[in-house]
């Protein structure tokens, strides 16, 4: 080899990038740069260095001071010199091979004068060239096909635009290219070659080195011969083909593995790659005289494919590496090369012909080019750029289509427009905006104009051009910043080289660089701190502010919040109107109620905020020990700062997020309680780094000079990446193991020392606490629309009143002299003015029509409803001491109209209490138990199964321990148990009293599965006893074995496995890995698998069986690692663990490397028990018409079985499973199954849908989405398995948004359900095993799934009915009240005189009509809770959505209007002659007014009375009380001048009159009669379901079945008794015994209670009272005084027939079961 | 713990188990109630009609027979004997005493005898505040306000031939009004002063006028014949000093002589309303009864449930 030339040495590095051909192109190109400014010279520098042939620099400017600041190629001494000359000289120094020219002329002028000058260049780069010049130049370049690149920078923003007609690239230098080896259609030479190899004759060595290509080709030929020339098509066939390969192996040859793996290539169908397709389809493929070689070859290639190639591209000629001996590989390679050559020549011939046809030189395109083309076929590529004219012309421009991008602030697209505006500005004004400092402001306005013009030109919304951008540009003032120039220079040069070398893909069109978007990516601070009072600290203070208000802003802020409510604002407007002189009412009338409403809310707010303030203060003023000024000082939490060294003692809380340095415990361990953060109650371990653990004294800490670099604050509590630089040279990685989070507490540890990392609002606790999305019930939303309706109604009244008052005034005002019109002060009003004020006057007079009290009433009602939920004893779970909790009172009525329930499975339908039940080890299955799921499954097939297990642990199998002792698989069992004992992250917590007893250790496990495994291992004698950071110990037969714990490869949902690497007591390094079956099977050692190892297959069968029994399975595998292999890997692992960015993925990748070649040991199966009462609850909910969708992360089999077990699925249903791998397949599957479901529905068969997470992803895409939904709606139950939390919420959203009026409820218990719970209309959390996250984000929290029935069917239904009644009634009563005003308007000259004294108008809603509806809203029950649960159909039947429909709303409004008419006109007609007082004296206005008001009070309250069906003393008290209050108040007014002289004596006179009472009676009758008649008719002749139930209840009550009562009462006592007796039961005597009752049972007179033998009681039972007890079946009976009973209840006495004794006993049991749900206290009220 | 919770929740209210009655509208209770109520209404109606029937009322319009400012006489003949007490009313129509501006244009404290300042009067008595609109306390009208200013000022005298009948013009206003609401100020307003609109605040016609009527057609008591009677067939005449103009607003003035019963004057509507409502009740009740007898619905039967 010759010595490399100087040039080669110089360019050696770049040759790697673009090889010699590229370099040649660079070295022969001549580039022109316009303007040698900062960015221009940077570009040129980057081109000079790689060795451009020559450049020409054109610049007419002189060097200025400004240049020296941003251009590296000028010096201060050069100021005043020609810039072109100076920079060119400096640039020249970089590379002597480059010829540099310069021209001292302004580029713009040159373009103007001599455009032809530019034709000589290969490429032109225009730096900051004015737009006009660019346009002109680009036209020329376009014409001559010279690439032109325009670069601009302004301040921190850069712009780059490439202009070239078309750019074709043959050598794209892509890394991954799939080459076509023609295995699926071998050419003749290849077949010939393959046939020449006789495999059978080869010796073993050669046999193992036959290239897989040959093997496959040969096999395929053979296959085709056997199968009529067809390649394998179906799955089976493909498998068969693969099996052939597999069976051909003599031993374990690598080439066969390759063949096996690459077998698909042999049958894969052929497709022309996309890039070639694109070329074939392009318009340029029709070659013309001018066509470039690229297109000529392209056309030839197309021709070749159509003819010679038979639809295929030519052979490429290279083959990839493969297992083969050198000889056969080269032979093979040659065959391919030859063929490629042949094809290339063929194409070259075609090209030649074309050239001849166009009279061009046939050798213009050399064969070399064609070959190159063919070789790089998979990479050839072209792009076209639009010309700049095209881009600027609004007709052809596509700028409009980018509008949304422009508007998106996170994009930089907008700067394109700003640059355009700036150039337009320059064209207009001759300078750039902001160039001179004085004109920045004025320039901004001018620039804005230009910007708007640009927007108008392209029909864009000018608002996208926010001032932010334009002002920014003006402030930049067309300055250049060197770093931006350097960056843009680099980018531009790179594109130039791409274009020159014709390699790689240049960017298409325009590039915008935004240098202002720099963000802090890392937090860095030093410690110990020196300045403790740094005011300029960039970190937030550690004080917590959870309060919303301060003393100063409280009033304005609450007022603002309150008046944002539409109704409150309305009342404010009314009050303002009342201040006008035309108002018929004084403001006080309205101010009082509004102030009341506002102050109630304000007081509540203030109190809540006070509590927050107090707790904030308490927290902020807690003390912690911080190392400051060389001493440990007590410092308030609020003053703790990032970088503080802090000491926390046991049981204290952490004041901020802290990186742990050292602890008092061995090995730097400490324990924390994270309950506050994630609700998990188990302790967690944190461990200090060994290097820092020694830092436990003041002196050592003070001598530190360290720093921490860590991630920015975020809300991920399970992750932390940081680096601790202990000294300058010593870097240690910090992970979440060292992070102590605010909100957690230190436990079981004396004290720790750490460094504060995040404070205040940066802490993960605060970052995680977000307000739950505020949900509004649909009733509330509907209420708003009803309010608007009412408002329109009100406005109509106002308009009518206004118009009429104008008309009346016009006609009568001047004539009615007694009104003194002409004496009125001020201007005599015109009718229009009167109409105008009349409008407002009538609005004011009738303003109560919008009920201000409604909100208050409704809120109180809802609050009490939610208390009822909290109080309900039947939703109280005694075992866990958890009552139900309504966490919001907003949604109480929403739970009455639920259509869909989305339920999690684990922990919701099941208990999430895990028990190790079965396992399969070494291919043998152990464990006898039968799960409920299995029982249910067997039941489906008509087989009754019984659990044969005895009491005790769930896992029972004698064989297991026997086989452990002596069996060929005993080693497996041993290893299996060891793994169960040590392969986990469980923490042992010693019993305080008996710390050495291993059986009393409490295993604190993060996942219940792990706890179950460790517990089971202990039971089987492998007792996990101790854990330190470096070791785990296990005690077997009282011998302690300690394993050195080398690494823990943690579990996460992506990995679906966890591993530990340990050194066993013998010193061997072993990796234990447990995880999901598919994950483990992928990583099994293929060699072992290929041997005669049946374990994987057997285990796979067992896995299937276990899953079908509803068990959760985990696979166990292990691997022995060589020492040096481990050490090498461990280095990588450690490195990955110290990465700051993307650590998680890097660590995962490293883990992947070691978790291979595993040996399968077996699998475990854990039972997840079904919760109490779930099947019944689901059945009830289904009967209530609610559709239940189960969304679970479990396997399909498990999910289906759980579905059956909890009666979600039944045998009668048609189970439809959606399948498919991509969108298309899923669509087909959906479509066909949907049709099937349709036909099923016609035939009365119920459908159930099952879908897995993978299909769900496709099912939620595009058109599938709605089809899936439609299908889902058609199915009774839907089960989605293997879904992610995100998918859960997507499914909820799908239904919520697409099914009209549907109300969704999501129920779950774990953190993975949070998204779903928040997405649904109502979220219910189960306070279960998995912590409290679900509960924290839910609206209702219950302890058990079964309580959901009561929550929905009882509370929900009642609440919905009550709330709607409250709303409708409130509207009604106010309409009835205010509508009379407009009627009276007619009789009072439309003067808006109020019919009632003003004071009575404002207290109408407070004193006379508020309480009854409140009581009804709180207490009303149309049917009892018992009936609601007995007839769940009531829930959907009459209930759903009808209660608050527009129709019903209008019925109530019209009723209000009707009542108003009756209540006004009847008294008017009755009082016609003003002389009903009896003594001839006239009555006058106020008598009339009070008479009508009395009617209102009676009618409105009695309307309330006929609406309720549930009369308690409270109803009586409030309804009659409200009426009484009216009389009392009127009498007070009548007897005192204090309030109003108008009413003096009115009540005294009026209430005495018979006439008054007769009028009231008549009005009440006339008002309520239609209502009652309709109600009566409807109830009797088209009764609603709930009415029938009411009647049933009534009938049951009416026949006071005392026997039933007695029976129940005795049952209640009996259940207790049975329990007691069961305990006492010792004799197995199968006799009936009469037992003595205890004292508490003395209900009925007792007779002789001496022990009476069974026979006596049989013969003479009439004499005795008491209990009989049958130990055989647990049944029991209380025998009453049978004579008495017999006389009272003739029929029932049959029970005392002894023959029926047994029957009754069993009946009794049933009843006991029933009473579980309906409970015994029901008896009391009967 | 759980015990405590159970105890704290034991109240029937908290468990929503308050004892309650749930009345149901059953035919067995509703139909009889309707029939009984119907009959009761009819009976009441008949009583009303009969009582009102005994009332004798004579009504004579006079504004169309008299020029304003003149004296004239209207004669009338009772259709039958009118036993005392016979009430003598004047009736105005199309007179909006209940107009908002009218109703509020008065000051009760002034009427109760207090001397009013101009500011107070301005606030309450607009637009009739002071003489010539002068803003002085002394110029405030006594009493002020539209109602006072527009007082009815016709004088009516009932005669039998030349004999003036003993119609009493005292004791016609509410006693409470005269006793406590209306008091003369001290000193009494000078009847000759142009600021005096009413010199005696307790004058009963005035007091009656001040009690505004509810509707635009109203009667006000003028006098009562406490002894004697108006006999059938006899001609009585009323001497009218016709001062009060009503024609401008299309109003009418009438004289009314009437007797009363316990339900007031001659108002037949009350009785007929009762009778009609009672009949409707009764008829519908009968209809329901028939329907119930022919095709009764069994109560609480499962078969009526929609899902059964």
Image: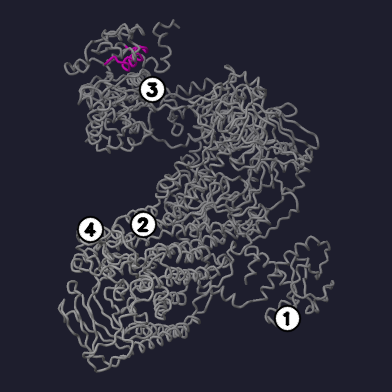
Q: Which residues are magenta?
A: A35-52
Mark 1 and mark 3 on one chain: yes
Horizontal side of residue A434 vs A1602, given as left or right: left
**Circle 2 or circle 1, nearest the eye:** 2
Horizontal side of residue B148 vs A1560, given as left or right: left
Give the quarter of the image for residue A483. Answer: top left
Most extreme residue toward the front is B187
**Circle 2 or circle 3, nearest the eye:** 2
Residue occupied by mark 3? A341
Q: Would you say the residues marked 1 and 3 are in contact, meaning their CB atoms lie under 8 Å apart?
A: no
Instruction: Verify whether residue B85 appears in magenta.
Output: no
Q: Position of residue A360 (x, y in %)?
A: 23, 21
The numbered mark, 1 or 3, whose residue comes first in the sequence reads 3
Q: Chain of mark 4?
A: B
Estimate the spatial distance between the alpha carbons at disc 2 and disc 1, rounded to whole Å.
73 Å
Can you tell which mark lies on residue A1684? Answer: 1
Task: Say whether residue A1487 is visible.
Answer: no
**Circle 4 or circle 2, nearest the eye:** 4
User: On screen, A1418 above or below A645?
Assistant: below
Estimate the spatial distance between the alpha carbons at disc 3 and disc 4, rounded to whole Å.
123 Å
Q: Would you say the residues marked 4 and 2 are in contact, meaning their CB atoms lie under 8 Å apart?
A: no
Quadrant containing the C terminus of chain A is bottom right
Q: At 25% across and 20% down in the image, what residue appears?
A: A129
Mark 2 and mark 3 on one chain: yes
Residue occupied by mark 2? A587
Principal secondary structure, stretch drawn in magenta: helix
Instruction: Verify whether residue A45 appears in magenta.
Output: yes
Q: Would you say the residues marked 2 and 1 are in contact, meaning their CB atoms lie under 8 Å apart?
A: no
**Circle 1 or circle 4, nearest the eye:** 4
Q: Chain of mark 3?
A: A
């Amino acid at each position: 080899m010759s010595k490399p030339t100087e040039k080669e040495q110089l360019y050696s590095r770049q040759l790697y990038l673009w090889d010699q051909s590229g370099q040649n192109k660079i070295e022969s190109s001549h580039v022109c740069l316009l303007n040698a400014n900062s960015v221009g010279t940077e570009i040129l520098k980057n081109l000079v260095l790689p060795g451009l042939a020559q450049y020409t620099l054109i610049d007419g400017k002189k060097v200025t001071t400004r240049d020296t600041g941003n251009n590296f190629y000028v010096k201060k001494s050069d100021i005043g010199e020609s810039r072109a000359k100076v920079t060119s000289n400096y640039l020249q120094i970089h590379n002597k091979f480059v010829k540099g020219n310069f021209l001292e002329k302004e580029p713009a002028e040159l373009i103007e004068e001599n455009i032809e000058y530019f034709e000589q260049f290969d490429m032109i780069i225009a730096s900051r060239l004015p737009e006009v010049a660019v346009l002109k130049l680009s036209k020329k370049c376009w014409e001559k096909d010279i690439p032109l690149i325009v670069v601009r920078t302004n301040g921190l923003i850069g712009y780059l635009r490439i202009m070239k007609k078309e750019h074709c690239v043959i050598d794209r230098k892509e890394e991954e290219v799939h080459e076509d080896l023609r295995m699926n259609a071998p050419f003749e030479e290849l077949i010939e070659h393959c046939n020449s190899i006789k495999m059978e004759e080869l010796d073993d060595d050669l046999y193992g080195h036959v290239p897989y290509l040959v093997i496959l080709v040969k096999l395929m030929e053979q296959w085709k011969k056997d199968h009529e020339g067809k390649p394998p098509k179906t799955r089976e066939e493909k498998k068969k083909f693969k099996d052939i390969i597999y069976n051909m192996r003599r031993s374990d040859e690598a080439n066969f593995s390759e063949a096996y793996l690459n077998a698909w290539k042999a049958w894969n169908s052929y497709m022309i790659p996309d890039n070639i397709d694109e070329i074939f389809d392009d318009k340029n493929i029709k070659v013309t005289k001018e066509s470039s070689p690229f297109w000529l070859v392209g056309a030839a290639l197309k021709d070749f494919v159509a003819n010679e190639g038979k639809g295929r591209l030519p052979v490429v000629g290279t083959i990839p590496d493969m297992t083969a001996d050198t000889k056969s590989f080269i032979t093979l390679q040659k065959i391919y090369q030859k063929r490629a050559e042949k094809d290339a020549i063929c194409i070259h011939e075609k090209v030649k012909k074309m050239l001849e046809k166009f009279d061009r030189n046939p050798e213009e395109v050399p064969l070399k080019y064609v070959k190159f083309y063919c070789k790089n076929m998979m990479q050839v590529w072209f792009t076209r750029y639009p010309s700049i004219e095209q881009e600027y012309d609004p007709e052809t421009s596509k700028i409009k289509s980018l509008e949304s991008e422009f508007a998106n602030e996170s994009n930089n697209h907008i700067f394109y427009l700003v640059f355009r505006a700036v150039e337009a500005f320059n064209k207009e004004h001759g300078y750039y905006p902001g160039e001179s400092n004085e004109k920045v402001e004025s320039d901004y306005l001018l620039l804005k104009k230009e910007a708007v013009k640009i927007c108008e030109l392209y029909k864009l919304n000018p608002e996208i051009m926010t001032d932010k951008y334009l002002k920014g540009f003006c402030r930049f003032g067309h300055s250049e910043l060197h770093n931006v120039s350097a960056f843009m220079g680099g980018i531009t040069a790179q594109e130039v080289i791409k274009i020159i070398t014709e390699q790689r893909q240049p960017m298409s069109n325009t590039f915008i660089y935004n240098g202002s978007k720099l963000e802090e990516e890392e937090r860095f601070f030093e410690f110990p701190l020196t300045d403790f009072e740094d005011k300029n600290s960039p970190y937030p203070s550690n004080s917590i502010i959870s309060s919303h208000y301060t003393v100063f802003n409280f009033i304005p802020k609450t007022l603002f919040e309150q008046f944002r409510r539409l109704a409150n604002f309305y009342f404010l407007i009314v009050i303002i109107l009342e201040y006008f002189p035309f108002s018929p009412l004084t403001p006080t009338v309205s101010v009082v109620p509004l102030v009341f409403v506002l102050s109630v809310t304000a007081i509540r707010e203030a109190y809540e905020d006070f509590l927050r303030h107090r707790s904030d203060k308490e927290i902020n003023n807690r003390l912690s020990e911080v190392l400051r000024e060389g001493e440990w000082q007590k410092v308030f939490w609020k003053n703790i700062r990032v970088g503080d060294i802090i000491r926390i003692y046991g049981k204290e809380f952490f004041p901020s997020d802290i990186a742990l340095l050292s602890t008092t415990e061995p090995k730097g361990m400490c324990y924390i309680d994270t309950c506050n953060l994630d609700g998990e109650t188990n302790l967690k371990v944190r461990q200090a780094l060994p290097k820092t653990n020694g830092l436990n004294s003041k002196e050592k800490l003070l001598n530190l000079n360290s720093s921490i670099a860590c991630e920015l604050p975020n809300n991920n509590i399970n992750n932390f990446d940081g680096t601790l630089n202990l000294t300058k040279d010593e870097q240690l990685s910090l992970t979440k193991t060292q992070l102590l989070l605010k909100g957690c507490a230190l436990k079981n540890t004396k004290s720790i020392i750490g460094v504060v990392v995040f404070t205040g609002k940066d802490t993960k606790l605060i970052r995680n606490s977000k307000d739950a999305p505020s949900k509004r019930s649909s009733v509330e939303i509907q209420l708003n629309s009803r309010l608007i309706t009412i408002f329109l109604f009100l406005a109509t009244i106002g308009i009518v009143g206004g118009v009429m008052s104008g008309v009346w005034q016009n006609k009568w005002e001047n004539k009615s002299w007694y009104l003194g019109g002409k004496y009125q002060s001020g201007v005599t009003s015109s009718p229009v003015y009167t109409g105008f004020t009349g409008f407002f006057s009538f609005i004011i007079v009738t303003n109560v029509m919008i009920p201000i009290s409604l909100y208050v009433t409704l809120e109180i009602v809802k609050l009490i409803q939610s208390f009822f939920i909290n109080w309900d004893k039947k939703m109280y779970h005694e075992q866990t001491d958890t009552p139900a909790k309504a966490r919001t009172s907003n949604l109480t009525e929403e739970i009455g109209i639920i259509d869909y329930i989305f339920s999690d499975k684990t922990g919701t339908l099941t208990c999430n209490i895990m028990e190790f039940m079965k396992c399969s080890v070494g291919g043998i299955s152990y464990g006898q138990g039968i799960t409920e799921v299995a029982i249910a499954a067997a039941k489906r097939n008509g087989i009754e199964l019984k659990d044969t297990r005895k009491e005790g642990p769930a896992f029972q199998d004698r064989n297991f321990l026997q086989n452990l002792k002596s069996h060929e698989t005993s080693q497996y069992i041993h290893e299996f148990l060891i793994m169960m004992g040590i392969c986990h992250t469980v923490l042992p917590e010693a019993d305080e009293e008996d710390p050495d007893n291993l059986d009393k250790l409490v295993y604190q496990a993060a996942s219940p599965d792990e706890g179950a495994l460790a517990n089971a291992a202990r039971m089987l004698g492998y007792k996990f006893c101790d854990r330190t950071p470096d070791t785990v110990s296990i005690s077997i037969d009282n011998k302690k074995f300690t394993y050195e714990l080398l690494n823990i490869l943690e579990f996460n949902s992506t990995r679906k496995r966890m591993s530990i690497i340990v050194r066993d007591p013998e010193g061997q390094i072993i990796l234990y890995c447990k995880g999901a079956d598919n994950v483990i099977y992928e990583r099994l050692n293929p060699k072992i698998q290929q041997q005669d190892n049946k374990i994987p297959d057997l285990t796979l069968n067992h896995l299937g069986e276990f899953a079908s029994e509803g068990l959760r399975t985990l696979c166990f595998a292990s691997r022995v690692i060589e020492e040096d292999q481990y050490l090498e890997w461990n280095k990588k692992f450690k490195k990955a663990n110290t990465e700051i960015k993307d650590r998680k993925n890097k660590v995962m990748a490293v883990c992947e490397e070691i978790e291979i070649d595993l040996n399968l040991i077996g699998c475990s199966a854990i039972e997840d028990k079904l919760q109490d009462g779930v099947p019944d609850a689901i059945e009830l909910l289904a009967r209530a018409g609610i559709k239940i969708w189960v969304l679970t992360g479990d396997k399909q089999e498990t999910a289906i079985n759980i579905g059956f077990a909890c009666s979600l699925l039944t045998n009668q249903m048609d189970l439809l499973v959606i399948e498919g791998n991509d969108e298309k397949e899923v669509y087909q599957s959906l479509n066909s199954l949907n049709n099937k479901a349709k036909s099923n529905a016609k035939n009365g068969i119920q459908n159930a849908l099952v879908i897995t997470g993978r299909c769900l992803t496709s099912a939620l895409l595009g058109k599938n989405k709605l089809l899936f939904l439609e299908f889902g709606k058609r199915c009774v139950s839907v089960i989605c398995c293997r879904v992610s939390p995100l998918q859960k919420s997507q499914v909820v959203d799908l239904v919520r948004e697409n099914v009209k009026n549907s109300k969704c409820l999501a129920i779950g218990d774990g953190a993975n359900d949070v998204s779903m719970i928040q997405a649904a209309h109502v979220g219910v959390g189960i306070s279960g095993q998995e912590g409290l996250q679900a509960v924290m984000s839910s609206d209702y929290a219950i302890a058990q799934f079964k309580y959901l029935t009561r929550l929905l069917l009882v509370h929900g239904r009642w609440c919905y009915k009550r709330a709607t009644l409250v709303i409708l009634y409130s509207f009604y009563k106010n309409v009835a009240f205010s509508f009379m005003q407009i009627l009276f308007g007619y009789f009072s000259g439309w003067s808006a005189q109020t019919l009632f004294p003003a004071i009575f108008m404002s207290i109408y809603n407070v004193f006379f009509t508020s309480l009854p509806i409140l009581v009804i809203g709180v207490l009303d029950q149309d049917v009892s809770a018992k009936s609601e649960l007995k007839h769940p159909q009531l829930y959907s039947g009459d209930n759903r959505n009808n209660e608050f429909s527009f129709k019903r709303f209008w019925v109530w409004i019209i009723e209000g209007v009707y009542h108003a008419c009756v209540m006004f006109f009847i008294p008017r007609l009755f009082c016609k002659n003003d002389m009903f007082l009896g003594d001839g004296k006239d009555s006058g206005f106020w008598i009339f007014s009070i008479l009508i008001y009395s009617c209102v009070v009676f009618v409105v309250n009695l309307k309330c009375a006929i609406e309720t069906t549930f009369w308690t003393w409270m109803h009586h008290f409030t309804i009659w009380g409200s009426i009484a209050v009216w009389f009392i108040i009127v009498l007070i007014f009548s007897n005192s001048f204090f309030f109003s002289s108008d009413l003096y004596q009115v009540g005294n006179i009026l209430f005495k009159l018979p006439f008054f009472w007769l009028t009231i009676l008549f009005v009440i009758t006339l008002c309520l009669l239609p209502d009652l008649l309709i109600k009566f008719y409807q109830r009797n002749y088209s009764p609603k379901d709930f009415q029938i139930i009411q009647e049933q209840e009534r009938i049951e009550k009416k026949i006071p079945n005392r026997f039933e009562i007695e029976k129940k009462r005795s049952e209640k006592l009996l259940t207790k008794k049975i329990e007691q007796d069961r305990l006492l039961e010792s004799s197995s005597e199968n006799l009936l015994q009469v037992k003595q009752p205890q004292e508490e049972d003395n209900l009925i007179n007792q007779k002789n209670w001496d022990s009476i033998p069974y026979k006596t009681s049989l013969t003479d039972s009439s004499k005795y009272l008491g209990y009989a007890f049958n130990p055989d079946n647990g049944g029991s009976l209380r025998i009453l005084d049978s004579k008495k009973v017999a006389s009272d209840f003739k029929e029932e006495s049959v029970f005392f027939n002894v023959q029926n004794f047994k029957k009754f006993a069993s009946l009794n049991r049933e009843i006991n079961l029933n009473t579980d749900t309906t409970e015994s206290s029901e008896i009391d009220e009967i | 713990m759980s015990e405590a919770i159970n105890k704290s929740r034991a109240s029937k209210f908290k468990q929503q188990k308050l004892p309650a009655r749930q009345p149901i509208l059953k035919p067995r209770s509703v139909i009889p109630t309707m029939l009984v109520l119907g009959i009761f209404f009819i009976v009441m109606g008949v009583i009303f009609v009969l009582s009102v029937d005994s009332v004798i009322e004579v009504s004579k319009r006079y504004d169309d027979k008299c020029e304003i400012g003149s004296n004239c006489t209207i004669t009338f003949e009772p259709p039958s004997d009118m036993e005392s007490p016979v009430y003598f009313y004047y009736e105005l129509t199309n007179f909006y005493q209940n107009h908002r501006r009218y109703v509020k244009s008065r000051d009760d404290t002034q009427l109760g005898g207090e001397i009013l300042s101009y500011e107070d009067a301005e606030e309450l008595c607009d637009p009739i505040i002071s003489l010539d609109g002068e803003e002085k306390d002394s110029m405030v009208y006594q009493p002020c306000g539209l109602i006072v200013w527009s007082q009815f000022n016709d004088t009516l005298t009932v005669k039998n031939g030349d004999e003036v009948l003993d119609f009493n013009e005292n004791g016609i206003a509410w006693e409470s009004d005269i006793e406590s609401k209306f008091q003369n100020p001290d000193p009494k307003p000078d009847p000759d002063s142009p600021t005096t609109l009413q010199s005696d605040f307790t004058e009963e016609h005035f007091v009656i006028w001040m009690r505004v009527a509810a509707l635009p057609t109203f009667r006000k008591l003028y006098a009562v014949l406490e002894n004697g009677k108006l006999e059938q067939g006899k001609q009585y005449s009323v001497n009218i000093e016709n001062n009060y103009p009503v024609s401008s607003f299309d109003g009418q003035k009438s004289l009314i002589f009437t007797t009363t019963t316990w339900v007031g004057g001659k108002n037949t509507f009350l009785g007929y309303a009762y009778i009609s409502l009672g009949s409707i009740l009764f008829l519908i009740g009968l209809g329901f009864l028939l329907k119930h007898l022919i095709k009764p619905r069994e109560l609480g039967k499962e078969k009526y449930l929609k899902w059964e």
